[in-house]
């Protein structure tokens, strides 16, 4: 069995612990399983029988496994990801609250619970407290620090150890509290953090939103009493706690509801803590440690049931491809204007496609002063359409789709590189699952003037239609007939074309589809990151192609 765990894995975070836990339990249940880890922004991954996405999604990787599972953290899930939810085979949720959020979007939502790696129960100093903010900006510790200013006698309060990442959060200790509040602004080594957590009797976490709460669960495993705001994920943990009421809803673009908390209410939590007897504190500590152990064992059984209940077969991307005899006819549409320098390159990409030529048609829509007809006339299935000047790219795409004689339309822009399998891969992906359109969002790019290779990854909060690369699109003509490109749009015409029909679309890997060329006259917004040094071409271009691109760069400069 081949298992791909896909995440934004950063050391010493709850997400990295999630990945470790999942990796470990899968190998316990299936000792012979091959478990691989991949970063979510990679354009492709190894073929697997199962993909498991931790927190973040990359729908272009769905095709690399027969089964796709997502374990979300709803506070980090953008509402713009909603079209992807129904494309998953399973959504496994850490909390009942999370399961309720995702159930309307997928019929295979399951509550599996979750756990953390135990830090072991230890004797407690109830005059020491720890604020477990870590790297999570939703747990900004300033509100806890400010609550200390409200007490007339700080000598009664526990020493407050604030563990946070100063590169993400700015923290200020009020005057007069320097001897009561200890800041740990840099990431502690694991042994240092574990020792501090083991000693402290009170663990504090005030968060706008949580998918689970590793820091709280770890603290409970040591026997800490908790001070938590009553957000759903914390309430479900069920630990003995000084509960702080959540206050107002924070407007956000996440699927979960985020909440603020008042300083005065945090102070009220400390007031209740100071009213506890030593016996009550010890009882609460022991109960939290025992509850952690019970929940941990329950999670193991829940995961055993969930994993062993999966219908996992051996998957092959090639075996699931459309047979050549069943491939549909394809019309390639290329809008162009005064880019004769690139058209020889474009014609070469078309001519090199591994697709039956009797099933190809190439329509070039040209409204430039310098016609490119001579550059394409050697292609037997090419049609050069000379148009009146001043047409938008949307108008030209619409004209190409209108004139297309075949049922599938594939975009080839005039200034990009399309590998030999570009059409075959896109059409195969289009035919899977009966989708109306496919496209890429993450795009490999090469700056031909500055000799820089880079990946363009649109921001995760953008909607699917805002992330689409028009140069990578393939769609059925019937899909276009339902709604074409808006003629008046001069750039990003794919947004309106896709919007509202995301459920009919599939996002695919760019690996076999395109290398976008960045050059002095490009109309695309894709640029190499500022300050990036020349790193050459990383996309396997031949020497002849590399030299040709160099000549084009000189002509355009």
Image: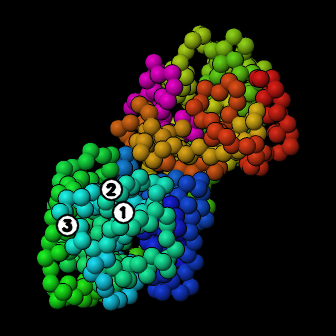
Cα–Cα gap, marks 3 and 2? 14 Å
Relative depth, front residue between 468 and 271: 271
The quadrant of the picture occupied by the N terminus is bottom right
Tell me which corner region of the image, top left, top right, bottom left or bottom right, holds residue 415: top right
**Helix, strand or loop for disc 1:** loop
Q: Which residue is mark 1?
A: 178
Which residue is located at x 33 percent, y 89 percent?
123
Classify 10 Å Cα crowding around label 2: few (below 14), some (14-19), many (20 and above). few
Q: Would you place residue 550 above or below residue 403 in this image? A: below
In the rendered image, residue 82, in percent from the top left (x then y), is placed at 35, 50
Q: Is residue 61 left or right of residue 413?
A: left
Magenta residue check for 492: yes
The quadrant of the picture occupied by the C terminus is top right
Cα–Cα gap, marks 1 and 2? 7 Å
Look at the image and tell me whether residue 93 can be seen.
Answer: no
**Region of the chain picked out in magenta, as a range:** 470-494
Relative depth, front residue between 167 and 551: 167
Q: Would you place residue 163 above or below residue 404 in this image? A: below
Which residue is located at x 72 percent, y 32 percent?
346
Classify 10 Å Cα crowding around label 3: few (below 14), some (14-19), many (20 and above). few
Q: Is residue 246 left or right of residue 119?
A: left
Tell me which corner region of the image, top left, top right, bottom left or bottom right, holds residue 109: bottom left
Relative depth, front residue between 233 and 493: 233
Q: Would you place residue 341 above or below residue 477 in this image? A: above
Classify 10 Å Cα crowding around label 1: few (below 14), some (14-19), many (20 and above). few
**Helix, strand or loop for disc 2:** loop
Q: Which residue is mark 3?
A: 153
In the rendered image, residue 47, in percent from the top left (x then y), is placed at 59, 66
Marks 3 and 1, the one that precedes in the sequence:
3
In the rendered image, residue 391, in percent from the top left (x then y), is placed at 55, 15
Q: Which residue is mark 2?
A: 175
């Amino acid at each position: 069995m081949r298992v791909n765990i896909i995440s934004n894995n950063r050391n010493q975070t709850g997400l990295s612990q999630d990945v470790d836990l999942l990796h470990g339990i899968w190998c316990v249940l299936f000792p012979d399983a091959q478990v691989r880890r991949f970063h979510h922004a990679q354009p492709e991954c190894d073929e697997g029988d199962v993909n498991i996405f931790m927190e973040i999604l990359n729908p272009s990787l769905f095709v690399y496994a027969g089964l796709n599972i997502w374990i979300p953290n709803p506070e980090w899930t953008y509402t713009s990801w909603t079209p992807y939810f129904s494309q998953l085979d399973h959504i496994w949720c850490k909390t009942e609250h999370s399961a309720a959020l995702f159930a309307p979007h997928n019929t295979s939502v399951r509550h599996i619970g979750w756990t953390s790696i135990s830090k072991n129960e230890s004797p407690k100093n109830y005059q020491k407290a720890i604020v477990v903010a870590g790297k999570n900006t939703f747990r900004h510790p300033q509100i806890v620090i400010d609550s200390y200013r409200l007490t007339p006698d700080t000598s009664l309060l526990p020493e407050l150890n604030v563990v946070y990442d100063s590169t993400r959060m700015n923290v200020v200790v009020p005057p007069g509290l320097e001897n009561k509040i200890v800041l740990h602004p840099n990431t502690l080594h694991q042994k240092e953090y574990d020792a501090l957590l083991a000693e402290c009797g009170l663990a504090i976490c005030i968060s706008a939103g949580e998918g689970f709460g590793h820091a709280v669960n770890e603290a409970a495993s040591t026997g800490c009493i908790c001070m938590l705001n009553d957000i759903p994920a914390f309430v479900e943990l069920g630990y003995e706690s000084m509960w702080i009421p959540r206050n107002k809803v924070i407007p956000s673009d996440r699927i979960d509801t985020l909440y603020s908390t008042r300083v005065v209410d945090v102070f009220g939590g400390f007031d209740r803590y100071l009213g506890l007897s030593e016996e009550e504190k010890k009882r609460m500590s022991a109960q939290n440690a025992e509850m952690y152990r019970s929940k941990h064992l329950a999670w193991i059984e829940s995961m055993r049931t969930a994993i062993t209940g999966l219908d996992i077969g051996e998957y092959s991307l090639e075996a699931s491809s459309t047979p050549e005899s069943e491939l549909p006819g394809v019309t390639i549409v290329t809008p162009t204007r005064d880019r004769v320098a690139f058209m020889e390159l474009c014609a070469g990409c078309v001519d090199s496609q591994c697709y039956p030529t009797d099933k190809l048609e190439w329509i070039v829509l040209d409204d430039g002063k310098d016609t490119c007809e001579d550059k394409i006339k050697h292609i037997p299935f090419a049609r050069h359409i000379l148009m009146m000047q001043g047409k938008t790219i949307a108008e030209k795409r619409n004209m190409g789709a209108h004139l297309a004689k075949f049922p599938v339309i594939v975009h080839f822009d005039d200034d990009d590189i399309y590998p030999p399998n570009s059409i075959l891969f896109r059409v195969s992906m289009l035919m899977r699952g009966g989708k109306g359109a496919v496209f890429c969002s993450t795009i490999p790019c090469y700056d031909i003037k500055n000799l820089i290779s880079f990946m363009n990854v649109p921001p995760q909060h953008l909607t699917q239609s805002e992330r689409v690369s028009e140069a990578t699109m393939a769609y059925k003509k019937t899909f276009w007939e339902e709604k074409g490109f808006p003629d008046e749009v001069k750039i990003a015409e794919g947004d309106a074309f896709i919007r509202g029909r995301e459920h009919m679309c599939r996002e695919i890997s760019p690996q076999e589809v395109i290398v976008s060329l960045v050059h002095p006259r490009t109309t695309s917004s894709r640029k190499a990151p500022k300050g990036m040094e020349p790193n050459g071409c990383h996309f396997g271009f031949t020497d002849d192609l590399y030299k040709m691109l160099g000549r084009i760069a000189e002509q355009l400069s």
